[in-house]
Image (cartoon, grey):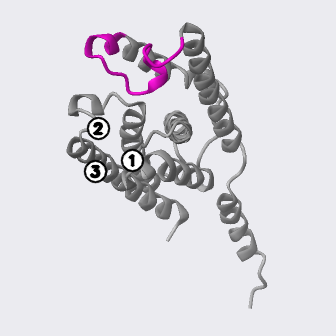
Amino acid sequence: MRWRTIFGVLRLLTAAVCLAALTHRLFWGLSSHTVAGDNFFAYLTVQSNCALVVALAIGGVLAFRRDADPRWFTVVLALVLTWTITAGLAFALIVWQAGLRGIRIDVPWSDQLLHFWLPACTALAWSLTPGHRRVPWRVVPASLAFPIAWGLLTLWRGPSIGWYPYYFLDPRQVSGPAEFLLTSGIALAIFALVAAAIVGVSRMPSPLARRARVAPVTAQSSPQG
């Protein structure tokens, strides 16, 4: 079986696992009253993982049908990975700070998958997948468009419903504009750093791709019997 076919199967399986984790997280939140149903999709983590499900499903089909991913798909997956990985880092920071303040945060298995395991495994698999293309550096500033738009929409929606998905966006939980601007700036800087790391990794040749190129040469150089 070709490497591209194997990774196509892995992409589809990962999309299915991600969808299952999103479904569990929705019903777990409803049963535990941690978040209302209409607020579930307000989380950046949820929105970015929904995008990951779609991207991986498309990527799985492309892996079956093409020897290399098209440029547009490489850019899309790089953007989605930037958002999911950064959301996981932010969630880890929130859990850590809550622990320091003695605040309990329940983290079900679906949250662990969505915030940590799925982004990490998807990024690793993508870096190894034969046929992935180099990501242009313009992806770094482009990656900020979604979190900025999401943040502005959240700030507009928050006062009318009295709820914010993350504490640092809630004016009642920060000391003032200075803390809000500092925290938001740090968050955007993390998005940019993660995007830059993904661009850098994309420019490194896949070891599996090198193996696929070396194998035919080795076979041709073998002595004829």
Q: Nearer the viewer, residue 198 or 206?
A: 198
User: Which is more N-terminal, label 2 or label 3?
Assistant: 3
Q: Which residue is mark 2?
A: 34
Residue drawn at x 32%, y 49% is 19
Q: Is residue 167 magenta?
A: yes
Number of marks in the image?
3
Determine which quarter of the picture holds residue 78: top right
**Image quarter hosting the C terminus:** bottom right
Marks 3 and 2, Cα distance to the nearest angstrom?
13 Å
> Label 3's element?
helix
Q: Which residue is mark 1?
A: 106
Marks 3 and 1, Cα distance to the nearest angstrom?
14 Å
Going by the numbered disc 1, the residue's amino acid type is Asp
Instruction: Report crowding for label 3: few under 14, some 14 to 19, many 20 or more residues within 10 A (C-alpha).
Output: some
The percent coordinates of residue 63 (x first, y second) are 46, 53
Marks 1 and 2, Cα distance to the nearest angstrom?
10 Å
- Judge whether residue 73 can be spotted in this image: no
Residue drawn at x 61%, y 42% is 133
As drawn, is 87 to the left or to the right of 43? right
The stretch of residues the image draws in magenta is: 156-175
- Residue depth check, mark 3 versus mark 1: number of the one nearer the observer: 1
Going by the numbered disc 3, the residue's amino acid type is His
> Label 2's element?
loop
Q: Which mark is residue 24?
A: 3
As drawn, 126 above or below 73: below
> Label 1's element?
loop
As drawn, is 51 to the left or to the right of 97? left
Instruction: Report crowding for label 2: few under 14, some 14 to 19, many 20 or more residues within 10 A (C-alpha).
Output: few
Marks 2 and 1: in contact by CB < 8 Å? yes
